[in-house]
Amino acid sequence: MSTPGTYGSNLKPYAGRLFIVEGIDGSGKSTQLTLLAQWLRSEGYPVVFSEWNSSPIVKATTSRGKKRRLLTPLTFSLIHATDFSDRVEREIVPSLKAGAIVLADRYVYTAFARDVARGVDPHWVRSLYRFAPVPTRAFYFRVPLEIALKRILGGRPKLKWYEAGMDLMLHGDIQESYRGFQSMILTEYERQVQEYGLTIIDATRPVEVQQRELRAAIRPYLPELREQALVP
Amino acid sequence: MNAFESLGIGIPAVDPSELTGWLIVIEGPDGVGRTTHVDLLRAHLERQGYAVAETGFTRSDLASRGIRRAKQGNTLGSNAFNLFYATDFADRLEHQIVPALRSGFVMLTDRYIYSLIARAIVRGAEPDWIKKVYGFSLKPDAVFYLRVEVGELARRLIYSRGFDYWESGMDLPMGEDLYDSFMHYQKRLIDELDVLSREFSFHTIDATRSVEAISEELCSQVSKLLQTGRSAETGNGRVSL
């Protein structure tokens, strides 16, 4: 996992903690992370929330590329790495140095799953993200494809072109393409569970049960941190 | 002449054996006269009947605006800038360079991955990492490196457009004012290009000479390269020997 020259080699010790959630669309990971943030704040911890694809400068280019369908698997991968790198440098690492608890909704594993599903070389993309700090704990919300699809396709029928993997030309119908693409992404996630020691959360259970498990899993990393952060 | 090779993983879904044009790179620091020489070389090749296309940094449809915006405010992380340039380059590779090579054009590029690798290394990127990032690139048929010392660059710039914020590495910065920073930054860039020049076998051209002398050397070297690459039978496009 800490092979030099690839993702996993940035193990710098920071004062803060980094917890991340991963999973396919409809796995409920964002709901869980929001609940976790509220709890941590109410406990008095300094919490920083970092979302995938949110660097202000890079976002405009990504949106333009998506809207005008300019992105290929290669540039899709690179523009997301650019965005992520900006957030690492300007948001994640400074917050970790300051002793914050950084919560990230999606992390490098999203890129590894999506880009490889799009045909990008798996070793290349892992090396592309070498700069990324390794999270304290990474949680993978595992859910069967059909359940996730029902949640997404039931509630929000307007799918976006790249999100549905239409660029791969798997299927002319956007919903069918989405199904196929999500299934490929799921396979790539499962591959990473072992590779990166992701902590599996069974996302078919009630929300509050998952939340209890999540809190219990991160609690051992917290107390000492709070004291540290409160020292003037 | 053999089919194109990639420096690493290659471009997803592109078969290099379908590319029949030539990829010629002009490298060199800011203000050395690359643009002038690309123009002269283009005219020379067109006179000889070659179809010529050209590209240069931040000319991609995808990322050029974003990079321009990011440069205005200096608000993008330094490593993110490295990757933004890589995105711009990848877009041009896939949408400008590859289509031109597929149609048998001579593609002249005003700088290539080498300048981008050099600027990343000067800003603290690990050399083997940034080289691996550019592993999707095509290996050019030739890289001509217009080389001068940094003192000569500075002399030329005070006679022309002066010192630019980014060309002086003021985002770092490497000195107390534009001039000091320019001297240190461009010196480091030239040092890195020198290292890359050995690693990737550039043809170094002494760019302290007159424009005419440099252009003559460049044009004759490129013509020679293209002639030996032509297929005798078809007279059209590169062939594997």
Image (cartoon, coloured by chain):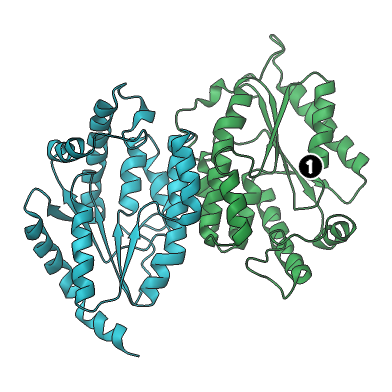
Using the image, determine if residue B178 lies above or below residue B71.
below
Using the image, determine if residue A19 lies above or below residue A120.
below
Q: Quadrant of the C terminus of chain A?
A: bottom left
User: Which residue ends up furthest to the top in the rendered image?
Assistant: B233
Residue A167 location, quadrant: top left
* Chain B tint as drawn: green
Q: Which residue is mark 1?
A: B35
Query: Which x, y percent locates residue B219?
Result: 84, 32
Query: Which x, y percent locates residue A95?
Result: 38, 72
* Chain A tint as drawn: cyan
Residue A6 location, quadrant: bottom left
Query: Which x, y percent locates residue B154?
Result: 83, 61
Q: Is residue A142 visible?
A: yes
User: Identity of the amino acid at label 1?
Assistant: Thr
> Is residue A12 toward the left or the right of residue A155 in the image?
right
- Residue visible at 68% across and 50% down in the picture: B198
Q: Quadrant of the N terminus of chain A?
A: bottom left
> Is residue B56 toward the left or the right of residue B35 in the image?
left
Query: Which x, y percent locates residue A21?
Result: 24, 56
- Residue visible at 84% across and 63% down in the picture: B151
Using the image, determine if residue A229 lies above or below residue A1.
below
Q: Residues within 10 Å of mark 1 (few under 14, many from 20)?
A: some
What is the chain letter for disc 1?
B
